[in-house]
Image: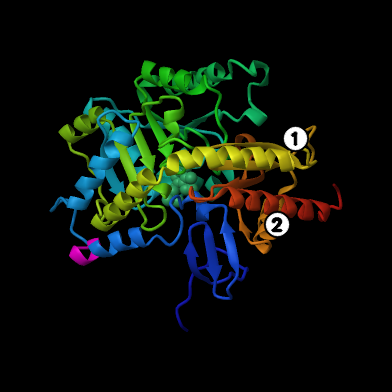
Amino acid sequence: MTGAVFSRAAGRDLPVVAGGRGTELFDTSGRRYLDAAGGAIVVGIGHGSAEVADAIATQAREVAYVHGSAFKSTALEGYAEMLGPLLPVDDPYIYPVSGGSEAVETALKLARAYHLARGEDRSVVIGRTGAYHGNTRGALSVSGRDGLRAPYLPWLGTAAHTTSPYEYRCPFPDSHPYGCGARHAQALEQEIVAQGPHNVAAFIAEPIAGAALGACVPPDDYWPAMTAVCRRYGVLVIADEVMTGFGRTGRWFGCDHWGVRPDLLVAAKGAASGYWPLGLAVTSGEVHDTVQRAGFVHGFTYSHHAVGAAAGLAVLKILSRDGLVDASARRGEQLGAELRAELADHPHVGDIRGRGLLWAVELVADRETKVPFARNERMAERIAAAAKDRGVLLYHSTGCANGSEGDLLVFGPPLVISPAEVTEVVTGTAAAIREVSRVRPSGGR
Ligand code: PMP
């Protein structure tokens, strides 16, 4: 028997990708797709950049691999120097790894190592219901997606969960429109007290919840209130910017919308825009110095990779030179406005939300009651397939309120998307939603 690929699309035949340029992908039959999802909200600078490919090739030719404990590399030093001032972290130190989950694992260990170095045996990390932080065991522990966690529960470690700021299905509806941030902070404080403050190492959250809950922008009073509670109890703040980092939400980092200064930050997807599997765990100077004094017991063979740093640096230069963070804000406003104009009245569109070029449409069976479709109707999957038939690639997710499941269409196109392509995305999506919701297996409308 010959070798075969363990497919991520079991039972489905996939087209073979042949190439990509900017926002477009082409398969081997010559079909064009408009990539409104940037793969999995990964590709920021667009497909097919010769500049990034050249940077990778140059570094690989010079030297591809040295162990991070034996050598420094010019690429990595240069990368940290350029990235440092852009990060919303005080005196940042960058620990480069191979992806989001590795970055989350690293940050979780750094949080515990920090407290141990200060003589405190804290091990609980508080995440949020419905959140996604990765598929490795530590990252899954702090995630709040029941469906992903269920098969692996015996392996998942010491984590707790608090409420998610999800305005469409707010757990504190009586506090709207003002004051719900304070209620979330109260819930976090109650969880810290329940766990015993001396046990709680960190709170982990995305500044704007990404694909798992569908581009949920918290109210403006959320982050100040949450960070105040963490500071009061000596709990470190870990900002998961795997999806929101590197211009995705119209600022360099999601934290920038509210001036949040986390103790630890993780990033990945946009960091190398998909050209290299690069993730970053970033610590504040204080966390770094404390942990390094005691010695940080950690490491991956492929952390501190020079080629990854060269890719990251090339991407950073392009984002900066081409003004793509501002472009994300501008095109994002267009995307949001056109999605609302086209879909706000559709009987199965419950909510349309987002910031920058991270948007989501939440589908519901009934707009009055906000009841989701039965999961076996697979609405998000079928709409994404119908959009793909029209040449528009969407990301879909089954995240929903507070751990239950629903149907989300998520938009995260390359930041280089043009105004005409934004309109093409909205038109293709609207047509797919109309087509699929007309012929539901249950026969309803
Ligand atoms: N955190 C967030 C917020 C993510 O969106 C993801 C990936 N979707 C991860 C962590 C895990 O990243 P990776 O898939 O690169 O391990």
Find residue 145 and report its horizontal and vertical position in percent.
55, 42
Nearest to N terminus: mark 1 or mark 2: 1
Q: Is residue 354 magenta?
A: no
Q: Work out whether residue 335 or residue 41 is closer to the camera in this orientation and state it.
A: 335
Name the kind of residue labelled 1 in the image: Lys
Residue, disc 2: 382
Determine if the magenta segment contains residue 60: yes
Q: Which residue: 68% across, 51% down?
A: 429
User: Which residue is rendered at x = 78% and y = 42% of the image?
Assistant: 346
Q: Residue at x 74, y 38 (%)?
A: 344
Q: How many marks?
A: 2
Q: Which residues are magenta?
A: 59-64
429 above or below 116?
below
Specify whether residue 201 is in view. Answer: no
Residue 370 is marked as: 1
- Three-letter residue code for mark 2: Arg
Residue 143 lies, in percent from the top left, at 49, 40
Tell me residue 416's x, y (percent).
Answer: 48, 50
